[in-house]
Amino acid sequence: MLHFPGSLVKEVHKTETRTYIGSAFVSTADILAGNGVVHIVDNMLGGTDFQKVNGSVVSINATTIRLATQAIGADFFDEDQLEEMAIGVKTLNIPGFNAIRELVATSNGGLRHHVPLVFDSDFSREETSKPDEKFKYPALEDVQRPKSDEDLAFMSVLQLGSLIKSKKVTSVELVKLYIARLKKVDYVLKAVVTFTEELALEQAVAADRLLTKGVYLGPLHGIPYGLKDLFAVPGYRTTWGSNLFKNQVINKESWVYQKLKAAGAVLIAKLAAGSLAWDDVWFGGQTKNPWNIYEGSTGSSAGPAASTCAGNVPFAIGTETVGSITLPSSRTGITGLRPTFGMVGRSWAMSLSESLDKVGPLCRYAADCALVLDAIRGKDPRDWSSKNIHLEDPFSVDITKLTVGYLPDADMGVVKALAGLKVKMVPFKLNYTVPSAEFIMNVTMGVDVLSHFDNWQRAGLDVGYEDQTAWPVELRRARLISAVDYVQAQRARGLLATEVRHVIESQKVDAFIGNSTDWERVCVGNLVGMPVIVIPTGFKKINGTRRCTTVQTGIYAAPYQDGTVLALAMAYQAVTSHHLQRPPVDNLGPDEDSSLKQFF
């Protein structure tokens, strides 16, 4: 028997290979004998409070450790090894991890204490450190203000910028127009979380005053826009779409908001994100698709997509971890750009995964996506993954020198249109040996999200989440992913990126096109960090009504080739009109399905 301070007595016993004090294993190296006295070296047992260890609600022993190893596919340890592991868990892991959580994980959303392990999407062998320059966008001359506000609302950012610069319309007028449009249909679209009307009018007045002084900030000067409600704006709620955070105010300026403010853009609303960036359901309801209000817009950039589609904002800012720009853009028939990973800074925006989150524009025109990207891209001092990345100017790309692959599921109408523009079109196969990019995504995102919402789960707040089949289920499963398996998944991710690089290089394509909603492809693109622009390529009528299902195409390229995908999208839209179509939203005509009236 050994007597510990505080009158705690523990029995010493041995097996053939181990020595234990109580249930604690002590290695031979930890036992020193001298002058007939046994000294226990403060190593494995150092600082252990046995009364607290033994007072655990659930006893951690060889049996519980075996059950845990079975849950993670690692059930290959013998009994003595399991006993040793149990002691290590109790004496090292639990107190150590508790201390770390107390230090960095008491708040949710990944706003602070960023992970220093930085993912780099640059698998190109070429140097990308060329001096960066702003895009040389075209100056539109003699743009006239249309007679109707409806036509004005659906003008491009370039056109609106020309009207503002020539003082044919003011920023204040545009702010009032778009806020009125948002308010008119939000009872059905449920796309707005918070109107920033007071701020918008202040910014619009300032933009108009600058013009009177001869100061023009660029193509976004005085242009209204909406911001996904993951981004912090001082004085306004940042709800993350969740009932649990619906009163949260983060008095910081997110990097994207700062960049847009410097460019002269005017924030008119914070737009709905699916709760904690999952799909299109938030505490205010489900954000609807303006083309078919029977269905949601998908998400999680639900509000930005729906509002842009309906002509209620000229452009909006969304985010994508996996599908949150591409899927709602596809559903609502707009033009959405998911840039190369690291292109746009993310500070003071809710984070799901620091190696996957991307920020991008949702617009009706590809050229507008280029303008907005040019304004928001660049190194963010608080975002270690962001970079000053040299991009080829999409307005200067000669598309006749490009070779573009088309996947088996590509829209042949798009293939023919690009071929007609003298783009070399060739069949393309996106081959790789990784059995499932989706599974790598599930592991990566699950662990990363849980690390940002560890406290949320431990406090039992997940039981109040809007959809109990979504994050609560995913993150409980993620709790059982071992660190080793997470790292192995990242190694598989690296293999995937290498193979995607090889297939693009070996087939000698500058970009490739295909279905924009194929889930495995969405996972591949996000894991690799590739850019994609989603463009509308057709509409299918629903039961003879004006409701439509949109047809979309994705234009993909290797990381840092954002200029190429933008140039191809602009060229396609120059010879087609799908992006000019306007959704019916809540306009019920005589032939409309009468059951739609339930929404009004």
Image (cartoon, rainbow, N blue to C red):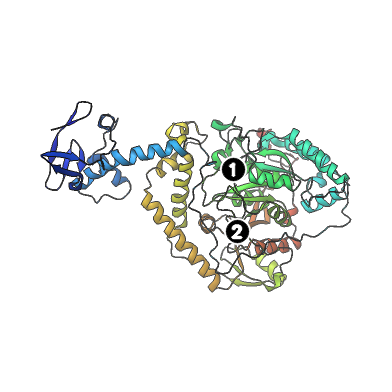
Q: Which type of secondary structure does the marked residue at label 2 adopt?
A: loop
Residue lying at 68% horizontally and 44% vertically, measured from the top left = 258
Quadrant where the image shows the N terminus: top left
Closer to the chain start, of discs 1 and 2, is 1
Residue 435 drawn at (x, y percent) = 42, 60
**Towards the viewer: 562 or 311:** 562
Q: Is residue 25 left or right of residue 221?
A: left
Mark 2 crowd level (few <14, some 14–19, many ≥20, 10 Å Cα): many
The image's mark for residue 349 is 1
**Towards the viewer: 278 or 501:** 501
Residue 3 drawn at (x, y percent) = 17, 30
Amino acid type assigned to the residue bearing label 2 in the image: Pro
**Towards the viewer: 397 or 411:** 397
Per the model, the C-alpha gap separating discs 1 and 2 is: 20 Å
Residue to which mark 2 is pinned? 531
Residue 70 drawn at (x, y percent) = 29, 46
Residue 509 drawn at (x, y percent) = 59, 71
Taking the image as drawn, is residue 470 in sight? Answer: no
Amino acid type assigned to the residue bearing label 1 in the image: Ala
Residue 67 quadrant: top left
Mark 1 crowd level (few <14, some 14–19, many ≥20, 10 Å Cα): many
Residue lying at 17% horizontally and 43% vertically, measured from the top left = 31
Q: Is residue 580 left or right of residue 68?
A: right
Residue lying at 25% horizontally and 32% vertically, measured from the top left = 50
Quadrant where the image shows the C terminus: top right
Taking the image as drawn, is residue 193 in sight? Answer: yes
